[in-house]
Image (cartoon, helix red, strand yellow):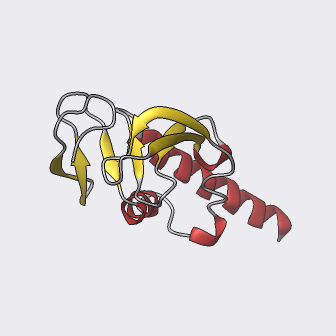
């Protein structure tokens, strides 16, 4: 598979216990839908409270490493982090440094939900 950003060859790599397709050139990684969910679950494992993953998107010039269709850009769970994804359900591209904010946003979501439930009680 080729990197959607630099067209270099993606390599298998283990990231936080998850096997991902990694670009050694620009340090980004491709995560299948299940792999993104596994990454999120390391920070917050309550899928029904995570919120909407994708609400709206815009086209990019980057191509899916699986089907070669154009990736789309979206605000991850309506937050400030922008990620790219394949609308054919092949997965997500995370640029270098975007995986940690995914986990931080999930940890913040857990804190917010806990605070909400405590306030309602």
Relative side of 7 to 9, left or right: right
Q: Could you tell me which quadrant the C terminus lies in?
A: bottom right
Q: Name the residue nearer the viewer: 45 or 97.
A: 97
Relative side of 91 to 49, left or right: left
Relative side of 80 to 65, left or right: right
Q: Name the residue nearer the viewer: 90 or 21.
A: 90
Marker count (numbered): 0
Where 109 sits versus 37, above or below? Answer: above
Q: What is the x, y in percent for residue 23?
A: 22, 37
Q: What is the x, y in percent for residue 104?
A: 49, 44
Where 104 sits versus 89, above or below? Answer: above
Q: Residue furthest right?
A: 120
Relative side of 45 to 18, left or right: right
Where 25 sits versus 39, above or below? Answer: above
x 19%, y 33%: residue:
8
Where 90 sits versus 64, above or below? Answer: below
Tell me which corner region of the image, top left, top right, bottom left or bottom right, holds residue 50: bottom right
Q: Name the residue nearer the viewer: 56 or 116.
A: 56
x 41%, y 55%: residue:
91
Q: Name the residue nearer the viewer: 6 or 120.
A: 6
x 41%, y 34%: residue:
62
Q: What is the x, y in percent for residue 36?
A: 42, 57
């Amino acid at each position: 598979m080729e990197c959607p950003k630099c067209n270099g060859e993606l390599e298998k790599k283990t990231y936080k216990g998850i096997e991902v397709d990694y670009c050694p050139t620009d340090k980004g990684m491709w995560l299948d839908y299940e792999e993104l969910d596994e990454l999120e679950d390391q920070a917050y494992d309550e899928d029904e409270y995570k919120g909407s993953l994708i609400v709206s998107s815009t086209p990019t010039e980057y191509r899916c490493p699986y089907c070669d269709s154009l990736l789309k850009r979206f605000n991850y769970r309506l937050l400030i982090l922008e990620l790219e994804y394949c609308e054919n359900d092949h997965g997500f591209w995370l640029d270098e440094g975007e995986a940690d904010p995914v986990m931080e946003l999930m940890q913040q979501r857990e804190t917010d939900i806990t605070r909400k439930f405590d306030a309602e009680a």
